[in-house]
Amino acid sequence: MAEPEAAPTAGREPFGSRLSRAMAHRGPLCVGIDPHPGLLKAWGLNDDAAGLERFSLTVVEAVGSLAAAVKPQVALYERHGSAGIAVLERTLASAADAGVLTIADAKRGDIGSTMAAYADAWLRDGSSLAADSVTLSPYLGFESLRPALDLAAEYGRGVFVLALTSNPEGASVQHVGGVDSVARRIVEAAAGENSRYPGALGSVGLVVGATVGGALQDLQLDLAAVRGIILAPGLGAQGATAADLKETFGSAYAQVLGTSSRDILSAGPAVGALRDAARRTLEPLLAR
Amino acid sequence: MAEPEAAPTAGREPFGSRLSRAMAHRGPLCVGIDPHPGLLKAWGLNDDAAGLERFSLTVVEAVGSLAAAVKPQVALYERHGSAGIAVLERTLASAADAGVLTIADAKRGDIGSTMAAYADAWLRDGSSLAADSVTLSPYLGFESLRPALDLAAEYGRGVFVLALTSNPEGASVQHVGGVDSVARRIVEAAAGENSRYPGALGSVGLVVGATVGGALQDLQLDLAAVRGIILAPGLGAQGATAADLKETFGSAYAQVLGTSSRDILSAGPAVGALRDAARRTLEPLLAR
């Protein structure tokens, strides 16, 4: 089912370029939209589709003109079935209206025509779930993601492929293989894929935890060579500061999109308080 | 976010036991419900939610009293956004009414409270998407799936974790690590997890491609020791025969649930023809 390698569609700006521009103008902050049951409760909302919608649209209103991107966590919409997915559709549309880029945090992955169907859902013009980019999971091999890589290139959209995470159990897959580790294979494949995007950063990003610490050195991962954005969840509540990000990512820090969810979201439901919390998170990220 | 290890809820039959019983009574066949655009067209249906629903309910009507399980491919519903997910909800309900077990082929995987949200969506009583079981992807480590493993145990539901697939690019992750390969770690973790289910087969199954050939020997994977059902996609259109399954899986063949999608589905849209195609696929699987 691999489609032929296609050059980015002429006339449509590639996602890597769009996101780089947003990061340069607004700063390298992505705000996660994570309507966890506990946060809904803290905001005085019900754990239902109506609460989900109120939560999501409030976050977009608060940070839509401030963050480089927002990242709705798909699992938290899927919990509410088709009604939740309908809220996600409205959330993505609202973010597009607000002029903020979207990263659908779906961690999808499959093979062949099934992977093509996931690409259709998240990356094709006209799909009700189309986002600017989607996160993908490569247990079936980086190349199994080909239909999404190609559709993203065609439509000026992007992907973020799971590479190295900081959860302790992640090492049992990602660190395996020593100097030729699973994580390193993903990093090198992403670098190769980004060679189809000349000039600016490519549209194939990676997910690398903000708190991976020395694992990047231990596994000899050259993230600067990837020439793509590094989505780094784990700012704030999960324990990383802006200084940690700079130390962890070193020469690749300019590509890092720091991601914070709970730390900012727990400042809600007031729009002004959410905005202030996002600004407080963003400020130290700007001091490169 | 790991929850404490819980014994299967007293009074509710574990999924491994329910599926083993269905395989013993009906034979080891799972029919994939894969409403691919090409199949919808071949059936004279539109590639929209109405076509998706007609397709899905027809398959359930045809094989609901014959197959041990049906496996809707979630990506093909997600392609149609919230309207497609609503059709999936009705498909799962229709399968439950027909008395056939369901495997939601979603290949979900994440960490912590996000993984718990996926577990909520697919495995919790009262969720509109609750299936008898769901497929999971372990790039973040087998233990990252803990919330789903525990919720499945609590509710008498099950999971199938991706272990070893036959797509050529799968080896670049799954075979890494030599004698201590990624695939072997997943197989051994599933075996450990099934020790919480005494007696019959446990509720933690694995996805292993029907066409993996000699990779099971090469990687020294002991599937019989897993004491769980092996979901083996790839019967028919993808090239494996019942004889291949027996040769590939050897002593673990009694645990294998052969899965066929396109070969059977292309016999539609007539219910009788679909049923005949399913029977033809099932017959050689029965001759153990």
Image (cartoon, coloured by chain):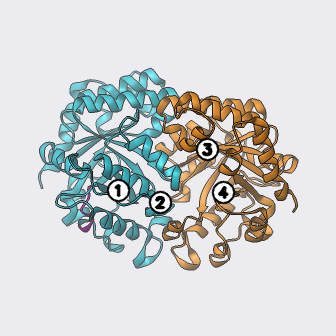
Chain colours: A cyan, B orange
Q: Specify the label residue A209 is tagged with.
A: 1
Which residue does the image show at 56% across and 58% down from the upper left? B142
Q: Amino acid at mark 3?
A: Asp
Q: Amino acid at mark 4?
A: Ala
Measuring from the top left, give residue A87's x and y in whole percent: 42, 27
For the question of whether residue B2 can be seen, the reply is yes
Q: Is residue A228 magenta?
A: yes
Q: Please name the residue that numbered disc 4 is placed on.
A: B237
Mark 2 packing: few (<14 Cα in 10 Å), some, or many (20+)? many
Q: Specify the label residue B34 is tagged with.
A: 3
Which residue does the image show at 44% across and 32% down from the upper left? A38
Chain identifier of the residue bearing label 3 in the image: B
Q: Nearer the viewer, mark 4 or mark 3?
A: 4
Q: Nearer the viewer, mark 2 or mark 1?
A: 2
Q: Specify the label residue A144 is tagged with.
A: 2
Q: Amino acid at mark 1?
A: Gly
- Mark sitting earlier along the chain (4/3): 3
- Residues at circles 4 and 3 in contact by the CB criterion of under 8 Å: no
Chain identifier of the residue bearing label 4 in the image: B
Residue A240 located left or right of residue B131 = left
For the question of whether residue A164 can be seen, the reply is no
Magenta extent: A225-229
- Residues at circles 2 and 4 in contact by the CB criterion of under 8 Å: no
